[in-house]
Image (cartoon, rainbow, N blue to C red):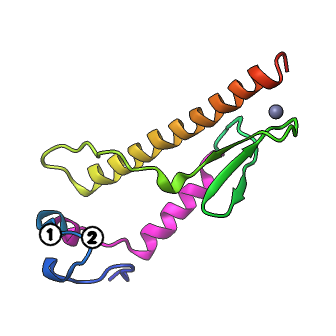
Amino acid sequence: MARRIGHTESTPEEDPISDDRDLDAFVGDLPAPTIDDVLRARREAEQAPPVVTALPMPEFVRGGIVRYRCLLDCGWFHDENPGLERPGPLLLPADFTAEDLSAAICGASEVRSKAFVMRVEQAIAAHFAVAHPGR
Ligand SMILES: [Zn+2]
């Protein structure tokens, strides 16, 4: 039998995180990942192609701020606080499975990630248009 990790047993009455008993029951019925699952996912992530982005390397500022400085070193910067981003609603079929839930979470994450990159790219482009036209 595979060893299970990150899985604990609790009843909905004991769960301090949620009042939603249907969701608690559903999550409680989900199989916990095995070590093989975690290692397979890690290997797949290592073999995935790198994410291509035109964003400069950010600076990580106290308070969870991700700061993008002007590449021309003029003192301008754009701050993002990913910790304040609210996850959007997950769109699931009525009879959703664990795979549907996983795909919905990954899809929502990808949408937020693309919006983040687009927001930063637009801020940098707007700065260059005003402060460094023609560069
Ligand atoms: Zn600048």
**Three-letter amino acid code at the position of disc 2:** Pro
Q: State the SS at label 2.
A: loop
Q: Residue at x 73, y 28 (%)?
A: 127
Quadrant location, the N terminus: bottom left
Quarter of the image holding residue 24? bottom left
Q: What residue span does the magenta drawing correspond to?
A: 25-50
Question: How far apart are the two marked residues, 1 and 2, measured between alpha carbons?
Answer: 12 Å
Dot 2 crowding, Cα within 10 Å, few <14, some 14–19, many 20+: few
Q: Residue at x 63, y 28 (%)?
A: 122
Dot 1 crowding, Cα within 10 Å, few <14, some 14–19, many 20+: few
Q: Residue at x 56, y 56 (%)?
A: 45
Q: Is residue 10 above or below residue 57?
A: below
Q: Main secondary structure of the magenta part?
A: helix
Residue tagged by mark 2?
31
Ligand 1 appears in which quadrant?
Answer: top right
Is 51 on the left or on the right of 42, as rendered? right
Is 30 on the left or on the right of 63, as rendered? left
Expressed as whole percent of the image width and height from the top left, the position of residue 105 reads 36, 51
33 or 56, which is in the foreground? 56
> Which of disc 2 and disc 1 is earlier in sequence?
1
Is 36 on the left or on the right of 80, as rendered? left
The mark lying in front, picked from 1 and 2, is 1
Q: Is residue 91 above or below residue 30?
A: above
Quadrant location, the C terminus: top right
103 or 44, which is in the foreground? 103
Expressed as whole percent of the image width and height from the top left, the position of residue 8 reads 29, 83
Q: Is residue 26 above or below residue 2?
A: above
Disc assigned to residue 25 = 1
Expressed as whole percent of the image width and height from the top left, the position of residue 30 reads 24, 67
Quarter of the image holding residue 46? bottom right
Whether residues under marks 1 and 2 lie with C-beta atoms below 8 angstroms apart, the answer is: no
Q: State the SS at label 1.
A: helix
